[in-house]
């Protein structure tokens, strides 16, 4: 996969970026170089390779990693009314915002 100058200009426009012609050409080269690397990586035969849950799984000399997770408990009460007092518009417990997509 590779991009064209037209596609770079469209992406820049969508991102609200104003690229000079030299910047656009540089971005085109960098992005296409990245896509070339991805293409090379995708061609590697990974048949029979087990996926790893953690990068250190590849190092058998390391002890197994146990994730230390805290219990998923609510630490703050639900105080919706207090949180919505400063909102410009609220209806039935929901924040009202202006329409941004036409």
Image (cartoon, grey):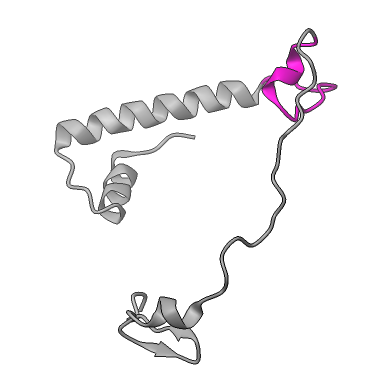
Can residue 45 be spotted in the picture?
no
Magenta stretch: dominant secondary structure: loop
Toward the top, the furthest residue is: 61
Can residue 34 be spotted in the picture?
yes
In this orientation, which residue lies closer to the viewer: 72 or 19? 72
Look at the picture and state if 67 lies above or below 46.
Answer: below
On whether residue 56 falls in the magenta region, the answer is yes
Residue at 68% x, 19% y: name it: 44
Quadrant in the picture for the C terminus: bottom left
Residue at 32% x, 79% y: name it: 86
Question: Could you tell me residue 4's position as x and y percent?
Answer: 34, 39
Image position of 70 (left or right of 90): right
Question: Could you tell me residue 29's position as x and y percent?
Answer: 32, 27
In this orientation, which residue lies closer to the viewer: 91 or 70? 70
On whether residue 38 falls in the magenta region, the answer is no
Rendered image quadrant of residue 63: top right
* Part of the protein shown in magenta: 44-60
Rendered image quadrant of residue 2: top left
Residue at 40% x, 29% y: name it: 32
Count of picture labels: 0
Toward the right, the furthest residue is: 48
Look at the picture and state if 12 lies above or below 68.
Answer: below
In this orientation, which residue lies closer to the viewer: 94 or 35? 94
In this orientation, which residue lies closer to the viewer: 102 or 68? 68
Question: Could you tell me residue 52's position as x and y percent?
Answer: 75, 26
Question: Could you tell me residue 91's position as x and y percent?
Answer: 44, 91
């Amino acid at each position: 996969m590779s991009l064209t100058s037209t596609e770079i200009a469209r992406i820049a426009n969508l991102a609200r970026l104003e690229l000079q012609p030299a910047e656009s050409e540089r971005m085109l080269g960098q992005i296409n170089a990245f896509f070339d690397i991805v293409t090379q990586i995708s061609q590697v035969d990974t048949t029979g390779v087990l996926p790893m849950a953690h990068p250190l799984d590849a190092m058998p000399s390391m002890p197994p990693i146990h994730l230390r997770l805290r219990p998923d408990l609510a630490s703050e009460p639900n105080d919706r009314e207090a949180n919505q007092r400063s909102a410009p518009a609220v209806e039935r417990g929901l924040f009202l915002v202006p329409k941004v997509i036409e």
